[in-house]
Image (cartoon, helix red, strand yellow):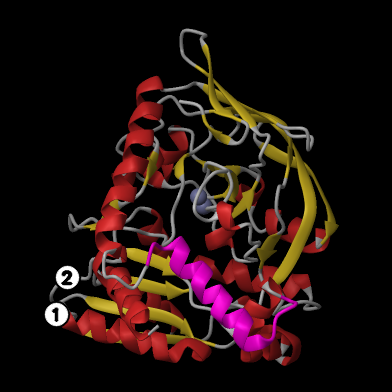
């Protein structure tokens, strides 16, 4: 275990973020996982990191704040947050985010408070824009905490649930304890790049999604769209991997080019709540109807966060036959669940999804057909019987996915 943990921390610092000599590292981490943040900090100093700066979080205190703080505090960020996030981003820092949460940490909280708090991200848009455009290296990875592990494995005692979630995470990020994770990641990234090359060569004008769950969705793609995935290159010229694990290749849809109905294939954890069995009706790119059997108020608040929140920002392809989905575990954490199934995201598009996008202004990105928003929420649509047909510029129809897997 000790060795696997060290290998994992080293993988995140050297491949996930590729921390450079003299670079600052900001780690966001729940207090429950302090031991792992320490391992990551040590691995960062090993490669010459200038300083590790911590941003601690705690489910209990977050919930208490949402339930009991004065109502006036939800319309602005706590003092210093803006300077902290925007300031380190401007300095070129690397950002490691340890994603570990009780999926229902905010159950019963007034959705209006959550929406207002999410809107405050506007104050740190310089930070979010830098991450979305891959100016700074960033990496999201996970470590189990008891409340999350118990949700994933409700029938097991706490320690067994924790051990099982650790195993599932190690399998997902290709850690065996033999020290070969870096080599395995190089191979994996190369496979994703080969899928990207095929998709970019075919340069589909649209994709049609269909499955027996009820999904029937046509998605137009921007004229200059490009597929991305695997690793990215920071503005300083260093490769990094933004999500560990990652199994997806993705691009952006044309902002007003989506029509039809899409059904979620898995529950979605959003803002400390679980949304289940939901579907959207979409017209000219905009969500015109949202229905959920559970968490409908949270879903409706999420798509009303701002103007762009009811439009789409991402189209991602993930084979049903992949190391995460083959574990047949519902993780209740988007980092894992989105890498087990084809997904879409409502909200902002990644600038890298159009040619030259990473150095374009907001206006230029909009003109290229990309959606802008302060939010970006992935939700899963891939099932074992999903079919996706791509249409090329000259009208050829080519199967992209058959029975949930790549057909290209
Ligand atoms: Zn994605
Ligand atoms: Zn996404």
What type of secondary structure mainly makes up the magenta span? helix
Residue 162 in view, yes or no: yes
- Residue 92's image quarter? bottom left
| Mark pair 2, 1: CA separation | 7 Å
Establish whether ligand 2 lies closer than 8 Å to the Cβ of label 1: no
Q: Is residue 79 visible?
A: no
Q: Residue at x 59, y 44 (%)?
A: 344
Residue nearest the observer in this picture, 321 or 209: 321
State the mark number for residue 90.
none
The magenta segment is 154-175
Q: Is residue 29 left or right of residue 49?
A: right
In the picture of the structure, the residue carrying the numbered disc 2 is 20
Q: Residues within 10 Å of mark 2 (few under 14, many from 20)?
A: some
Q: Nearer the viewer, residue 2 or 334?
A: 2
In the displayed structure, does residue 6 sit left or right of residue 259?
A: left
> Is 172 within the magenta?
yes
Question: Is residue 25 covered in magenta?
Answer: no
Question: In which quadrant of the rendered view does residue 71 lie?
Answer: bottom right
The image shows residue 277 at horizontal and vertical percentages of 80, 52
The one of 28 and 2 positioned closer to us in this rendering: 2
| Residue 180 in the image: above or below residue 396 | below
Label 2 close to label 1 by CB (< 8 Å): yes
Query: Where is the C terminus found, in terms of image quarters?
Result: top left
- Residue 113, given in percent of the width and then of the height, sits at 72, 75
What is the secondary structure assignment of the residue under circle 2? loop
User: Compared with residue 211, is residue 11 higher up or lower down, i.e. above or below?
Assistant: below
* Disc on the earlier residue, 2 or 1: 2
Rendered position, 276 above or below 157 = above
Tell me the residue that label 1 is attached to. 48
């Amino acid at each position: 275990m000790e060795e696997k943990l060290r290998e994992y921390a080293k993988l995140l610092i050297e491949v996930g973020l590729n921390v450079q000599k003299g670079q600052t590292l900001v780690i966001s981490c729940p207090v429950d996982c302090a031991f792992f943040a320490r391992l990551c900090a040590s691995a960062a100093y090993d490669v010459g990191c200038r300083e590790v700066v911590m941003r601690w979080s705690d489910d209990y205190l977050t919930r208490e704040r949402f339930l009991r703080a004065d109502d006036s505090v939800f319309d602005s960020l706590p003092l210093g947050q803006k300077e902290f996030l925007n300031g380190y981003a401007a300095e070129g820092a690397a950002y490691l985010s340890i994603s570990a949460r009780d999926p229902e940490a905010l159950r019963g909280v007034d959705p209006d408070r959550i929406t207002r708090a999410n809107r405050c991200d506007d104050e740190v848009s310089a930070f979010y824009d830098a991450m979305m455009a891959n100016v700074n290296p960033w990496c999201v990875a996970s470590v189990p905490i008891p409340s999350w592990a118990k949700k994933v494995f409700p029938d097991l005692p706490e320690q067994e649930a924790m051990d099982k979630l650790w195993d599932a995470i190690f399998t997902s990020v290709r850690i065996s304890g033999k020290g070969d994770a870096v080599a395995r990641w190089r191979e994996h990234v190369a496979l994703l790049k080969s899928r990207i090359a095929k998709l970019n060569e075919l340069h589909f004008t649209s994709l049609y999604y269909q499955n027996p769950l009820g999904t029937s969705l046509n998605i137009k793609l921007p004229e200059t769209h490009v597929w991305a995935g695997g690793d990215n290159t920071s503005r300083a010229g260093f490769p990094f991997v933004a999500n560990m694990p990652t199994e997806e290749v993705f691009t952006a849809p044309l902002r007003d080019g989506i029509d039809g109905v899409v059904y979620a294939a898995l529950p979605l954890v959003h803002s400390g709540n679980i949304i289940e069995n939901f579907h959207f009706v979409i017209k000219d790119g905009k969500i015109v109807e949202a229905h959920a059997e559970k968490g409908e108020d949270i879903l409706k608040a999420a798509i009303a966060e701002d103007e762009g929140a009811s439009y789409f920002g991402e189209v991602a392809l993930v084979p049903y036959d992949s190391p995460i989905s083959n574990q047949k575990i519902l993780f209740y954490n988007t980092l894992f669940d989105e890498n087990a199934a084809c997904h879409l995201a409502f909200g902002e598009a990644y600038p890298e999804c159009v040619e030259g996008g990473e150095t374009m202004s907001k206006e230029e990105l909009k003109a290229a057909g990309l959606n802008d928003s302060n939010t970006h929420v992935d939700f899963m649509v891939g099932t074992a019987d999903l079919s996706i047909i791509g249409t090329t510029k000259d009208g050829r129809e080519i199967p992209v996915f058959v029975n949930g897997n790549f057909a290209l």
